[in-house]
Image (cartoon, helix red, strand yellow):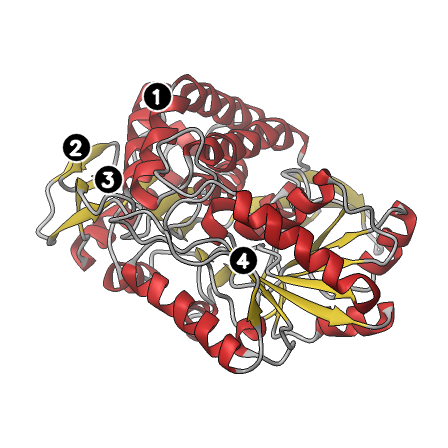
Amino acid sequence: MHDFPGVYVAGHWRPSAGEVREVVSPATLQTIGHVVDGTADDVGAAVAAAREALGSKEWAGTSARERGELLGRLADALEARATAFGDLVSAEMGSPRSWASFGQVGTALGVLRTYERLAGDFCFEEIRRSALGGDVVVRQLPVGVVGAILPWNAPLFTAALKLAPALAAGCTVVLKPSPEAPLAISMLSELFDEIGLAPGVVNIVPGAVATGEALVADPGVDKISFTGSTAAGKRIAATCAADVRRVTLELGGKSAAIVLDDVKLDRRTVSGLLAGVMSNNGQVCVAQTRILAPRSRYDEIVEELAQAADRLVVGDPSDPATQVGPVISAEARSRITDQIAEAVEAGARVVTATGGEPGPGWYVRPTVLADVDNDMRLARQELFGPVAAVIAYDTVEEAITMANDSDYGLAGAVWSADPDRGYEVAAQLRVGSVSVNSSAPLDFGSPFGGFKQSGTGREGGPEAIASFVEPQTIIR
């Protein structure tokens, strides 16, 4: 049992008057830990601690290189306990244990190692020649106290995406983990203590919507960095706009993978296409759940995908052999199965096996749907489940138009025997990240984020550090 009976403020856990929340495994439906829903007073205390740390000599006096070294020590501490963190993430949100090692812990380590290097390379001060004569000093100052609101589907990775550039910039942070997956984030406090992080630099306040709203509304917060639903992101943006506060939003997606007619349907391609949909039980924001296939090869592609999906091992996420575990909740499972049924009623076909899901958890068997129309709700809304919609196209131009015909613009992929041809198509997609012959449109040292309703701002790379600083010009 993993119990965190309070909030982590100024370097220690303190009691909270908030309600105790049970954290339930989506695979076993058993309670695996407890946290407290932080109150508005808890949020205020955490923000005050972060504000005090921001101006302290212990933190404000650090150099960028020293902050990079601290991120390296944090990575070392996480790597030393990678097994424990992987086990906990797998238990609390159902990630297959094999995927938790890389997709959860491994990606967090990759981000921390990247910013260990980028912190020292980032230009925090430069001297320019003034157009009016004399010198101009341009400084990059930390934006201040950051409220970081995390999703449940990739808690460690998204925490690293926010913490690493914010700390590299010299900011202080209040982390608000998701109520569905707060345990691994709470356990990070042990690493902060281990590496000697100055008190108040990072604080943790678990909680649900009310806790997040208190953090967004707190006038002591200079910037909100949020990953989650588009609906919640709009409300956060409106609150921040009213106070003219900074905000970065990484929101939903309905990404498309375009399969060109020259593609080689070997094991690597088929498994890559499926990985783009089924990874983390289909619960990733960059999931390429719309697979656009040329009509000339449509039946072949559908058959290969269906057979491969039926071979995926569905089961207990703690079993190393499991490839697909449960979705996060009973409500999520109902939403997914309802949309599958709605699509079938509208003319789509389920081409994979049905039934036989293991119990007692919230499982959805990997599903491939053929004859999907791009106007169906299944093809328009983010589903967050192991469901692939295969949509036919006649020309490459039609495929590009179809891929761009979405309220979202987070990610995408192009599959082709000719990488140069794949690049030409990828460059025409109105999305933040595109991979060619891969299902992973993410690079830790490069910007990541979305067009349209997929968000504002970017995470990853030096661009993320730039989003946590305010330029100051001194003319002398």
Q: Is there any visible trace of residue 341 in the rendered image?
A: yes
Q: Nearer the viewer, mark 4 or mark 1?
A: 4
- The residue drawn where x is 40% and y is 73% is 338
The x, y position of residue 208, in whole percent, is 25, 58
User: What amino acid is at disc 3?
Assistant: Val
Quadrant housing the N terminus: top left
CA neighbours of label 4 inside 10 A, class few (<14), some (14 to 19), many (20+)? many
Q: Which residue is mark 4?
A: 352
For residue 456, which numbered disc appears in the image? none
Per the image, label 3 sits on a secondary structure element best described as strand
Per the image, label 2 sits on a secondary structure element best described as loop
Q: Earlier in the sequence, mark 3 or mark 4?
A: 3
Task: Determine contact: label 4, label 1, CB under 8 Å.
Answer: no
Question: In this orientation, which residue lies closer to the viewer: 414 or 305?
Answer: 305
Q: Which residue is mark 1?
A: 196
The residues tagged by marks 4 and 1 sit, at their Cα atoms, a distance apart of 52 Å
Per the image, label 4 sits on a secondary structure element best described as loop
Q: Earlier in the sequence, mark 2 or mark 3?
A: 2
Q: Nearer the viewer, mark 3 or mark 4?
A: 4
Q: Earlier in the sequence, mark 2 or mark 1?
A: 2
User: What amino acid is at disc 4?
Assistant: Thr
- The residue drawn where x is 48% and y is 65% is 383
The residues tagged by marks 2 and 3 sit, at their Cα atoms, a distance apart of 22 Å
Task: Determine contact: label 2, label 1, CB under 8 Å.
Answer: no
CA neighbours of label 3 inside 10 A, class few (<14), some (14 to 19), many (20+)? many
The x, y position of residue 88, in whole percent, is 31, 33
For residue 1, which numbered disc appears in the image? 2
CA neighbours of label 2 inside 10 A, class few (<14), some (14 to 19), many (20+)? few
Q: Earlier in the sequence, mark 3 or mark 1?
A: 3
Asked if residue 360 is positioned above or below residue 70 in the image, the reply reads below
User: What amino acid is at disc 1?
Assistant: Gly
